[in-house]
Amino acid sequence: MSGKLYLVGTPIGNLGDFSPRAVDALREADFIAAEDTRVTLKLLNHFEIRKPMVSYFEHNKYASGAKIFERILAGESCALVSDAGMPAISDPGEELVRMCAENGVEVLTVPGPSALISALTLSALPTGRFCFEGFLSTANKSRREHLDSLKAERRTMIFYEAPHKLMRTLEDMRDTFGAERKISLCRELTKLHEQTIRTDIKGAIEYFSRTPPKGEFVLVIEGAPEAGSAFTLEQAAALAESYRSEGLNRRAACKKAAAETGFSAKTLYDLSLSAPTDAK
């Protein structure tokens, strides 16, 4: 008879958020699969838990995941944890869950803290419908394509971001969503220096130009307004042409107009190329 996989949520900063049920789950498991065994060891020591651990993270998820799965099939129960928050969210645990689900192995959850849900509740933005987009790519082109695909997204959007990438991401968000789009930036959630900044993208760029970003961030951005609520396609195209007359090149003008009107930059660019009055 196979064992079970337990998904155990861990604190995102404050150890007081670790639930009694989570403590019991770690004590009762045969072994613990941890993103970083050094981080998890601190948690185990605090709660006086002694259990064998195995490393399971993004770069060894296939080799280590297969070994973990074999142990579960052999009858052992595994508690899967990440460094902070719920495993399997922006985490290789999703692969292990899939393997178990496809092979009839029982998976149980022990809910715990979640940075994305905590930030959403603090944002003062609509919470009825939202989408989680995780970490953006470090590659400029991929990051911009990801953001461009969300241009018309009307749900509240949630992203994770590292401090050293924050300014570049905010600048790309400004170019994609517009400088006036509302944003909430949460950092160091549940920790001593927890901070939530509610502003617009322009204000966020100005603030962090003066104050170097520190700590991991959760960005919560309001969704797009209803398409066509303020501009027609013809008006958006005219706005792009007005920016060109001010000296911007075609691509930059269309990108700026797109950010302000909600239309795709590619749509405006293609329309500009086909305009009969344009000699180029």
Image (cartoon, grey):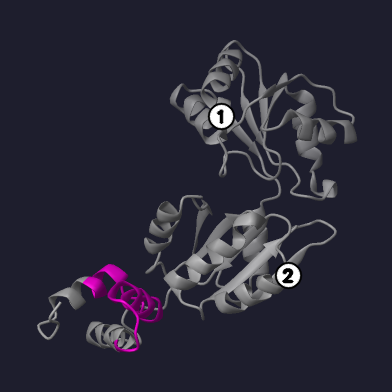
Q: Give the side of residue 28 with respect to residue 75, left or right.
A: right
What secondary structure do most residues of the magenta stretch adopt? helix
At horizontal 9% and vertical 83% (from top left) the residue drawn is: 276
Position of residue 193 measured from the top left corner of the image (x, y, whole percent): 82, 61
Q: What span is colored magenta in the figure?
A: 245-269
Q: CA distance from mark 1 to mark 2?
A: 34 Å
Q: How many marks?
A: 2
Quadrant where the C terminus is found in the figure = bottom left
- Which residue is identified by label 2? 211
Relative to 189, residue 171 above or below: below
Mark 1 element type: helix
Position of residue 189 measured from the top left corner of the image (x, y, whole percent): 74, 58
Position of residue 239 measured from the top left corner of the image (x, y, whole percent): 31, 87
Judge whether residue 238 is colored magenta.
no
The residue closer to the viewer here, 113 or 201, is 201
- Which residue is identified by label 1? 59
Relative to 229, residue 213 above or below: above
Amino acid type shown at disc 2: Thr
Relative to 50, residue 177 above or below: below
Q: Give the side of residue 176 with respect to residue 192, left or right.
A: left
Position of residue 198 measured from the top left corner of the image (x, y, whole percent): 65, 75
Amino acid type shown at disc 1: His
At horizontal 71% and vertical 32% (from top left) the residue drawn is: 36
The residue closer to the viewer here, 107 or 90, is 90
Q: Which mark is residue 146?
A: none
